[in-house]
Amino acid sequence: MNRNGLSGGIGRERIDDHRRRLFGIAALGIAAAQIGLTASAGAESTPPKSGRVPSIKPGTNKSFARLKQIDAGVLSVGYAEAGPADGPPVLLLHGWPYDIHAFVDVAPLLASAGYRVIVPYVRGYGTTRFLSADTLRTGQPSATAADVLTLLDALDIQAATLAGFDWGARTANIVGALWPERCKAMVSVSGYLIGSPEAGKLPLPPSAELQWWYQFYFATDRGRAGYDKYRHDFSKLIWQLASPKWKFDDATFDRSAVAFDNPDHVAIVIHNYRWRLGLAEGDPKYDAIEKRLADAPVIGVPTITMEGDANGAPHPEPAAYAKKFSGRYEFRLVKGGIGHNLPQEAPQAFAQAVIDVSRF
């Protein structure tokens, strides 16, 4: 047992060259070799006195310097890292259907401000792999939260600022609510996202149900087969619907789409959405966590929630969740046609929020 009461050992860090030989498929291996930060943080580790993030054009950076690989709990986690090793740690958490490139511009901004930035692939994405074929391929949020805890343990990090969007924000919410000693502060796009299968059984107004069309599609065998066969085109459609004013090019999408070729990707995604509707059982090892989450616990860590003014994905109104944050709290609306993938569309605003909340 580790310090979180979760099973899983503390792994030894290994860079990507070794782990790719063991786990990587050819396409992912090539991508991992090319992923990198275009700017080194070595000589820029001192936080600016003003605390202000310099302006940056979204899409300035294309890749990370390299991927690392570390055993953590049930996974071998692939992740990018930037900034000084002794800097305040920040974990940047992506969602579906996105990947670590959502933070490709955010990471160097934080690294240059002196932060140790860690950007992991979620289970089912990129070079992250299960260590055992016998592990249940669950996508339930309590499992991704447990993955964060075991990753912190493996990296010997007691507490970090957690920042994410979509699944990543939901994961950060859970850690902040149940293990506040591991979460120094939090940035959460679209606010409070902790849910449960019981809550998922409650019907929504028709217009809201329409926004969740893909969730109902995934509930069918046809939907699973369709996502497996057309995951590239399907994910691109979600990008377009969720960020209707973001004019990303094919190269930007394709860099992220490589991560969806993970052999467990479809199983994780389908299980996540079926579990939300109570159509799939969760892993019993997380039952105790799920019972705590079913009460929609209040989050007490310092938090900044954010929303883009053109978010086309389902999301709650800020007033509906403000009282779920009992610590120092602030909401920020990012204007300019910013959609669901806020870190990639507005990296300066997202990085500024991380710096600001870490100083609350």
Image: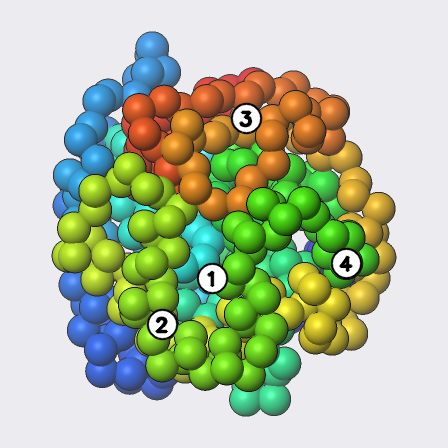
Q: Of helix, strand and loop, which one carries label 4?
A: loop
Asked whether the viewer can see residue 152, the reply is no
Identified at 56% across, 63% down, the residue is 215
Q: Which residue is mark 1?
A: 122
Q: CA distance from mark 3 to mark 2?
A: 32 Å
Camera-near label (2 vs 4) is: 4
For residue 226, the mark is: none
Which of the labelled discs sits on residue 231, or is there none?
Answer: 2
The crowd level at tag 2 (other Cα within 10 Å; few <14, some 14-19, many 20+) is some
Going from the N terminus, do you reach mark 1 or mark 4 first?
1
Report the amino acid beneath label 3: Ile
Q: Please tell me whether residue 199 is drawn above or below residue 269 in the rendered image.
A: above
Residue named by callout 4: 201
Distance from Cα at disc 1 to Cα at disc 2 = 17 Å
Q: Position of residue 115 (x, y in %)?
A: 38, 34
Measuring from the top left, give residue 127's x and y in whole percent.
36, 71
The amino acid type, in three-letter code, at marker 4 is: Lys
